[in-house]
Image (spheres, helix red, strand yellow):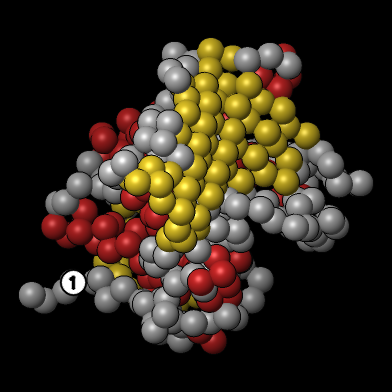
């Protein structure tokens, strides 16, 4: 079957554009990276000489040849640029977080439906290898009924990174919007919306202007979920710890290797892509079929390419969308509730 590439424009060539979207789009024959917005230089042409580099977002959005717009600009601009792109008749991928507020998310969902265009959010960490492995463990009930899950996404960055909007106080900045939008998306995939949330959010690094740690407690019926991140964790522990009525699952430590592979300019899908070394495999201590089992579990290889593979199938073949905007709207709803809980220093009930 002949492939008709989706003509795509990338609105920024910073870290997310150069490391994630550019390589993943380029590796998929269903997309053509036609246009890249790069205001201050033309370095994108070194990697994508066939792409046109333009200096303004409007030039990319208003190009009639473009079908898909990737909005990977600062968080507070997501709403305005997505609105422009949808009104221009484009399909849209929004970098996480989807928006800054739930209202903005709802307005965009309604506009996409009115325009009959695909709107999705780049929740690529649904395709982290350790998360795929965790999903399989839970689906097979290898620890019985889950009573507690603790999830971590930690880094060690004991300095304030210069010349980045992510370290400047402003609307939609801080670690909860940044890393938390990944983690909360994963929790919603696993368990849906909690009944209440109790959150503590703040600044730990000297001189910091944005929140750099959070500790969220999500309550479900018979299940407690703990979600934590900090920029001051030098010795990382397991990313996931699960306890159930039959046993425990201790996930691997460290982040998925795909991000570093992309930074190293490795081609997505090349030999060994997304695989974890044996030292990073998970541990299982449980009862299966009446037998006590202690074992290590090989981590399923991750594959961020699946996001764009699905998107091509949605746009060209009418298949179901993997990352629905309503799901990413619920992530923002949780983030807003977490900040409300932190201000009030009490648990907040959710609708």
Q: Residues within 10 Å of mark 1 (few under 14, many from 20)?
A: few
Task: Answer above or below: position of 301 versus 331.
Answer: below
Q: In which quarter of the image is residue 46?
A: bottom right
Question: Where is residue 346 shown, x and y percent of the image?
Answer: 68, 14
Q: In which quarter of the image is residue 177?
A: top right
Residue at horizontal 49 percent and vertical 42 percent from the top:
248
Is residue 155 found left or right of 318 in the rendered image? right
Is residue 315 found left or right of 191 in the rendered image? left
The image quadrant where one finds the C terminus is: top left
Question: Where is residue 156 shown, x and y percent of the image?
Answer: 76, 57
- Residue 169 appears in the rendering: no
Is residue 172 found left or right of 270 in the rendered image? right
Say which residue label 1 marks: 4
- Residue 198 appears in the rendering: yes
Question: Where is residue 321 shown, x and y percent of the image?
Answer: 26, 47
Residues 86 and 74: in front is 74
The image quadrant where one finds the N terminus is: bottom left
Residues 46 and 347: in front is 347
Residue at horizontal 67 percent and vertical 44 percent from the top:
229
- Return the residue found at the far left: 1
Q: Quadrant of residue 324?
A: top left
Residues 221 and 78: in front is 221
- Return the residue found at the far front: 291
Residue at horizontal 47 percent and vertical 25 percent from the top:
223
Is residue 185 found left or right of 141 in the rendered image? right
Task: Answer above or below: position of 190 versus 129.
Answer: above
Q: How many marks?
A: 1
Residues 249 and 92: in front is 249
Question: Where is residue 323 shown, x and y percent of the image?
Answer: 34, 46
Residue at horizontal 22 percent and vertical 41 percent from the top:
116
């Amino acid at each position: 079957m002949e492939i008709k590439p989706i003509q795509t424009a990338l609105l920024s060539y910073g870290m997310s554009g150069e490391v994630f979207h550019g390589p993943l789009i380029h590796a998929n024959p269903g997309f053509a990276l036609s246009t890249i917005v790069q205001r201050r230089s033309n370095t994108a042409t070194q990697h994508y000489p066939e792409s046109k580099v333009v200096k303004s977002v409007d030039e990319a959005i208003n190009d009639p040849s473009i079908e898909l717009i990737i909005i990977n600009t600062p968080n507070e601009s997501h709403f305005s640029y997505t609105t422009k792109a949808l009104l221009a008749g484009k399909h849209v991928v929004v970098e996480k977080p989807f928006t800054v507020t739930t209202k903005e998310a709802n307005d965009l969902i309604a506009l996409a439906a009115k325009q009959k265009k695909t709107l999705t959010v780049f929740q690529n960490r649904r395709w982290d290898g350790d998360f795929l492995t965790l999903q399989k463990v839970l689906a097979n009930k290898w620890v019985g009924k889950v009573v507690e899950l603790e999830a971590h996404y930690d880094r060690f960055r004991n300095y304030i990174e210069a010349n980045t909007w992510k370290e400047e106080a402003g609307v939609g900045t801080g670690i909860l919007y940044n890393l938390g939008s990944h983690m909360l998306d994963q929790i919603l995939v696993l368990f849906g919306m909690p009944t209440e949330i109790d959150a503590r959010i703040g600044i730990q690094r000297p001189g910091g202007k944005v929140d750099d740690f959070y500790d969220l407690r999500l309550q479900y019926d018979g299940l407690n979920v703990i979600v934590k991140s900090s920029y001051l964790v030098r010795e990382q522990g397991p990313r996931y710890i699960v306890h159930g009525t039959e046993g425990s699952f201790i996930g691997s430590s460290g982040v998925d290797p795909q991000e570093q592979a992309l930074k190293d300019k490795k081609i997505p899908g090349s030999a060994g892509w997304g695989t974890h070394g044996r030292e990073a495999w998970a541990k299982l201590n449980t009862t299966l079929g009446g037998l006590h089992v202690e074992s290590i579990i090989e981590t399923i290889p991750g594959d961020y390419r699946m996001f764009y593979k699905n998107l091509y199938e949605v746009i060209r073949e009418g298949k179901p969308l993997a990352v629905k905007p309503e799901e990413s709207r619920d992530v923002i709803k949780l983030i807003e509730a977490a900040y409300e809980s932190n201000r009030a220093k009490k648990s907040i009930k959710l609708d």
